[in-house]
Image (spheres, helix red, strand yellow):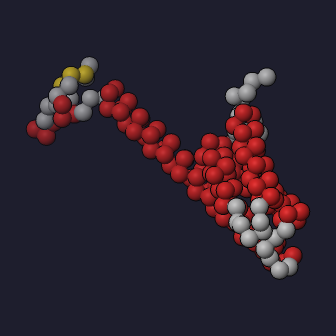
Amino acid sequence: MNISKPGMIGLSRGILFLLLSVMLGIAYLDYATDKNVVVWGLYLLPVGIASWLGGMRAGVALSLLGCVLMYVAGLYGGTRFDGTGYFLLGIFNRLLALLLVSWLASHLFRKQMLESTLESYEACFDYLHASPKSGAKHEGGNVGKDDSKR
C-alpha cells in the first residue's frame, strides 16, 4: 500500500487520513462543548491545508464534509439557534466561509507555484542565452557588436 500516492481529490492517503481525523476531532469537540461555545472556525485549518496541498477539489470536499459534521454535531449536541431554519442558514454561511478559504488557499498556492516556475524559467533562459549586452560569443559571431552601422 503506497501511502504517498495522490488520491481522487489530490491528497495522499496519509494526509487525507490526518485531516479527516482532525475534522472528526473538531466535530467531537463541537458536540461535547456547550452550545454557546463556537468552534466551527477550527474547521478552517484542515480545509486550508487541504486546499493548499490538494487544490480546490480537496478543499471543496473537506468543506462539504465539515458542514455535514457541523450539522450532525448541532443536531445531536444542540445549537444556539432558535429554529431549524436559522441553524441551516448558519451552516450555509459557514459553508460559504469554508469555500472562500478553500478558493483563497488554492489560488495562492497556484500563484506561488507559477511565480517560482517563472523565476526558474527566467534563470534557465538567462543561463542558456547570454544577454546581448554582455558581449558573449556565439557561433553566429559576436552578439555584442553594434549592428546599427549596417
Percent across and percent down for residue 130 are 26, 29
Residue found farthest to the top: 139
Q: Nearer the viewer, residue 94 or 115?
A: 94
Query: Looking at this view, is 65 or 146 the one in front?
Result: 65
Quarter containing the N terminus: top right
Tell me: residue 58, above or below residue 11. Answer: below
Compare residues 103 and 94 and report the one nearer the observer.
94
Left or right side of 35 for 144: left
* Quadrant in the picture for the C terminus: top left
Examine the image and state in which quarter residue 71 appears. Answer: bottom right
Residue sitting farthest toward the left: 149
Q: Specify the quadrant of the image occupied by residue 134.
A: top left
Asked if one can make out residue 84 in the rendered structure from this viewpoint, the answer is yes
- Vertical placement of 85 versus 102: above or below? below
- Indicate left or right for 102 with 139 as reference: right
Q: Is residue 20 above or below residue 92?
A: above
